[in-house]
Image: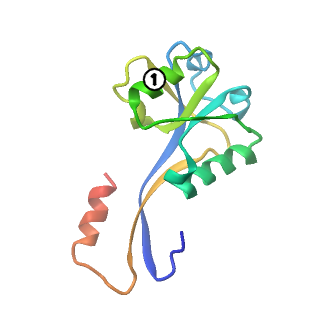
Amino acid sequence: MDGTGLDVRTVRDEPLGVLMTRGHPLAALDGIGWADLEGQELLWFPRELASGYHDAVLAACRAAGWRPALRTATARRAITRAELASGDPVVALRPRWDAAGEPGLAWRPLTAEGAPRLRYGLARPGDAPHPLLPGLARHLAR
C-alpha cells in the first residue's frame, strides 16, 4: 500500500503461531521452529483477499527456508477444521485468538527467528486530524 500523505499507526501487533488439530504430531511440541514445518502444507487464503499480508507472510517463510505447498483456505471455520483434520500434513499460520474455542484444534507459538506477525493499522489523512481518532486507536489496541 502506498501510504503517501497518510498518518499510519500500528494499533495491534500479534505473533503468528501454528494452528493444527490436537492429534497432529507437531501439537506435542511446546513451540515450533521453521525446521519442524518441513513437509507440511500451509492452509492459506487467496492472495486477492489481502495481497500485502499474503506476500509478507510467505516471504518470511521463504526467507527462513520453508517453502510450503499452499492449500487454499476458505473463510468457513468448519471447512478449515476439516482441512486441518484431513490426516494430511497441513497446518495454518494464525494468531492465538483464532484458535480460541475451536474444538479439536491446537495452537503452538512459532518460536523461530523471523516469525511473521499480524499487524493492524489505523490510517488517516495526515493533514486532517480528527478528535475521535486517539480514542479509536486506544480501543482498537485492546
The percent position of residue 50, horizontal first and vertical second, equals 51, 54
Q: Residue at x 40, y 82 (%)?
A: 126
Which quadrant would residue 42 be assigned to in this image? top right
Q: Residue at x 24, y 66 (%)?
A: 135
The percent position of residue 113, horizontal first and vertical second, equals 68, 43
Which quadrant would residue 12 be assigned to in this image? bottom left
Q: Residues within 10 Å of mark 1 (few under 14, many from 20)?
A: some
Q: Which residue is mark 1?
A: 81
Residue nearest the observer in this picture, 22 or 29: 22
Up/down of 42 relative to 138, above or below: above
Q: Residue at x 59, y 14 (%)?
A: 87
Position of 66 with respect to 14 (left or right) is right
The percent position of residue 109, horizontal first and vertical second, equals 54, 33
Residue nearest the observer in this picture, 90 or 73: 73
Looking at the image, what colour scheme do you see? rainbow
Position of 126 with respect to 71 (left or right) is left
Give the amino acid type for the residue marked by disc 1 in the picture.
Arg
